[in-house]
Amino acid sequence: HPDVAQAAVISHDVRDTGAQLIAYAVAPAGDPTELRGYLAERLPGYLVPSAVVLLDRMPLTPHHKVDRAALPEPVFAERAYRAPRTEDETVLAELFEEVLGTDRVGIDDDFFALGGHSLLVVRLVSRIAAATGVPVPIRTVFQHSTVAGLATRFRGAAGPAAAEDPLAPVFPLRTEGQYPPLWMIRPGAGLCWAYLGFVEHLPERQLYGIQAREYDPAKPPTRSVREMVDDYLAHLLEIQPEGPYHLLGWSAGGTIAHAMAVELQRRGHEVALLAMLDSATSGGRGAENVIEVNDILEDVKTRELVRNVLGERNHDSAYLPLLRTMATITVEHAALLDRFTTPVFDGDLLFFTATVNNHKFAAQWTPYISGAVHEHEIPCEHRDMVQPAHAALIGAVITAALADTENSH
């Protein structure tokens, strides 16, 4: 922007809504609202700062780096307010306020512009269901994120046919979008809930998760990785019969995505993108990373994830059996992967490495990738790669990679 001499953007914890982007600008003639509008015209929504703070000068450390500790607290611009007009809008505005820890939410206010993110979406749909009895699909909030927009949609989402089954073999994270699907393959526990953090960071992209069939008690347990691959590809090909295909997997999901990509190529299909989040080759996890069923049952973060997605059901008779199924799938499928012979994929690999306690998994894949392994380092631990701040970074890289593959076509 011509008025901006210097600028810095940081991630800042605001209220209890988590991290938000805050922009600081040295712009003597600048206007914060105009500058934010300028960015909104040029950037996807998830990259637009929640606030722009004007400075006389940028505070620097003795080493001439931005002195983050000296940056002032952000000041949020007043929003034009339109009061709720209907009972549904009133209920939704109150629930926005409750979940986001803010006040005076109007019908034009956007959940994400107010600091919402994917994990808060989970909390919001849980509260909507509890307050209204309407099971709103998670993707509906991403597609209609203002109070007014959601109010016009959420009654139409009522009924079991419209609400996502969080345990279904295919978990639709976004079914609308101008770009073809990115297929997100379940990690160790067999569910794709963790990928919810990527929805807002992969704009205009159809997104589907493939989940383990063992959550359906009528289905037999998977006996081999080959059977798992055939099962998952049947779901994928039913929704997307023609390629090119784009696959992403986190942890064990990356190992499975690689096997799926090889099988797609064997059947004559094109795989344009294969991406992994800190995945090991078959048998490459190392003894120090092996976990047991009880480790998962006692893990606080896993228990919290189940409660967030299913709602506050810690006294529900379905809660502990579901948690035990997650643990059993994690352990038993890891054993199947350890016995699987890793094939060779004909193409490149986009690999994201968690640098805290780095397991050096990327190097394991060199013999099993005919092209190049493009490694990107993410400053976090393995289990935190899907947290909002890291999902934003990973999503930006994947979006650029997908654009490259589509431009080549």
Image (cartoon, rainbow, N blue to C red):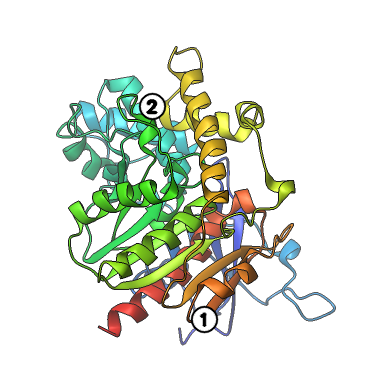
Q: Which is nearer the eye, 301 or 184? A: 184
**Residue 234 placed where, x, y %?**
25, 50
Taking the spot 27% from the left edge, 21% from the top edge, the residue there is: 132
Q: Are marks 1 and 2 in contact (CB under 8 Å)?
A: no
Can residue 30 be seen here? The reply is yes
* Numbered disc 1: secondary structure: loop
**Could you tell which of marks 1 and 2 lies nearer the N-terminus?**
2
Q: Amino acid at mark 1?
A: Ala
Quadrant of the rendered structure where residue 241 is?
bottom left
* Mark 1: few/some/many CA within 10 Å (<14, 14-19, 20+): few
Quadrant of the rendered structure where residue 156 is?
top left
* Numbered disc 2: secondary structure: helix
Circle nearer the viewer, 1 or 2: 1
**Does residue 404 appear to the left or right of 71 in the view shown?**
left
Rendered view: 33 above or below 128: below
Q: Which is nearer the eye, 278 or 30? A: 278
| Residue on which the image places disc 1 | 372
Q: Which is nearer the eye, 346 or 83? A: 346
| Residue on which the image places disc 2 | 127
Question: In the rendered picture of this protein, how many numbered marks are placed on residues?
Answer: 2
Taking the spot 45% from the left edge, 83% from the top edge, the residue there is: 1
**Does residue 100 appear to the left or right of 133 in the view shown?**
right
Q: Which is nearer the eye, 358 or 372? A: 372
Can residue 102 be seen here? The reply is no
**Residue 50 placed where, x, y %?**
48, 58
Taking the spot 45% from the left edge, 13% from the top edge, the residue there is: 316
Rendered view: 107 above or below 37: above
